[in-house]
Image (tube, rainbow, N blue to C red):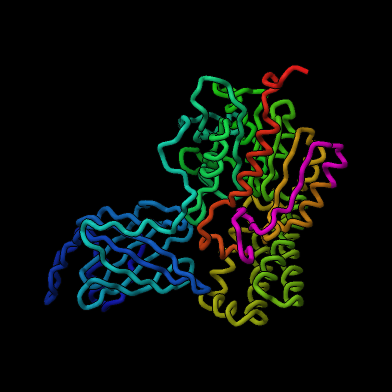
Amino acid sequence: MYDRILVQTLATAALLCGCAHAPDTLDDEEPIPPIEESRWAGTVALPGGDALEFSVHIAAGGAAATISIPAQGVEDAPLSDVSDDGADLAFTLPVPAAPARFAALRDADGQNATGTLNQGGMKLLLRMRKLAADAVAAAGPNRPQTPKPPFPYATRDAAWDNAADGVTLAGTLTYPDDGAPHPAVLLITGSGAQDRDETLFAHKPFAVLADALTRRGFAVLRVDDRGVGGSTAGTGAITVQSNLRDVLASAAFLAAQPEVDPARVGLVGHSEGGILVAMAAAAEPERVAFVVALAGTGVRGDALLGMQAAALERAQGVPEAQIASDVAQQAALMKLVVDGADGATLRAALDQAVRARLESGSEVEKAQIRQVGVETLVAQQLTQLTQPWLRSFLVLDPTESWRQVRCPALVLIGDKDRQVPAAENLAGIRAALEAGKNADATLEAVAGVNHLFQTAGTGAPSEYATIEETMAPAVLARIGDWLSEQAADPAAAPAP
């Protein structure tokens, strides 16, 4: 159980932290009031001025409590270590490696509370308001494109095995319910632990894309990543190569479904998924009929991270000299990872880098480092740098796979993408396809859209949550039109 962080007296804190068999009262103390059922809506003030909305439901007695954070796709996640004495209110969201502790003090009438969210060394302002007993907190940000039933097609959930890795994968198949075999696509998520809808900030881009393509006559399979939703975690390390094996197992499952024409199965991948479509098409060309890469990369992983860092800082108005220094510093750290440096070496390099930023960074950055603490920040970044996936990505050159892709390919990158800059990555993929003599490839920089293919202002990731649009309609139409051309049934063509 996590320690309670309260904002009242030491005596009260000690009383509330007592063990389960402690007496209900101490000398000259009032009895602890039982926890009543309550519902709350709140906000956390994030760095940069944005506010993260959440809602909490605490059951009578406090044994059961849940939190929903719509912008992060969190719904009814269980809370632990709940305390509420009518004045102090506290609870913990037990996030692995970085539990989030909410602690607030109620105002005089008990209808509002103010306090802090403590997570990973950061303390953020927290405000909450009590809701009526039968009230439901606001549903979160408006996402008008998220599909809602009834649907003019069939849907079923399924599970299948990646036998090579001992992993069970789970997903949702949507298909026209007319008894005929249809062209099909497998949707492949980006990096990190993603659910089958690729949910981010309450956006569900894969649900939107699957709906649009199924209405066009495709069977569409979208999949939970390992350890997410219905997919098991397995015991092996997650790398780009393990993700590829999951993709190949999912493609084989899709091709075997009775609603699918196995000769017309394609892959559509976003971000890392845009790399995996090329790797899968190169590995099993007989299975993959066509591919769509959305914000896929065309340079080696370590080179991409340098481009990404520069593009993100440039969008924030960071001076070019500072950008060059930051990119060089990052490159030095990435080289240590690529070279297989041990934890102690990486920790020392990170400590030096963070302390350098504390001296030369912007005032906002310095304040954030002081708030979190150098040691905490170094520990957090060390965890990221030692993940097996990172090294597998840094040394991966996707052009090696693109040179082997022989099937039709559509490659789209937003011209406001700050995570996968369009010019350099399209150039790398184009050169690889030309070297492999693929004459049926279309590459486009899509005007006005970001990494998520939303119509964007600057393209900075800070905009993702504030844009209502999940995916630009023009992009959905472009993908659908191209896929329909590739998947046209040869048997339906008129005789010459």
Q: Residue at x 64, y 57 (%)?
A: 449
Q: Residue at x 54, y 52 (%)?
A: 470
**x, y percent for residue 124:** 44, 72
- Which is nearer the eye, 63 or 37? 37
Q: Is residue 460 left or right of residue 334?
A: left
In terms of image quadrants, where is residue 477?
top right
**Numbered range of the magenta stretch:** 431-459
Magenta part, dominant SS: loop
Q: Residue at x 39, y 58 (%)?
A: 93
- Which is nearer the eye, 379 or 408? 408
Residue 460 is covered by the magenta coloring: no
Residue 51 visible in the snapshot: yes
Residue 298 position (above or below residue 174): below
Q: Is residue 46 left or right of residue 1?
A: right
Residue 218 position (above or below residue 492): below
Q: Quadrant of the N terminus?
A: bottom left
Residue 445 is covered by the magenta coloring: yes
Q: Quadrant of the C terminus?
A: top right
In terms of image quadrants, where is residue 68?
bottom left
**x, y percent for residue 386:** 63, 56
Q: How many marks?
A: 0
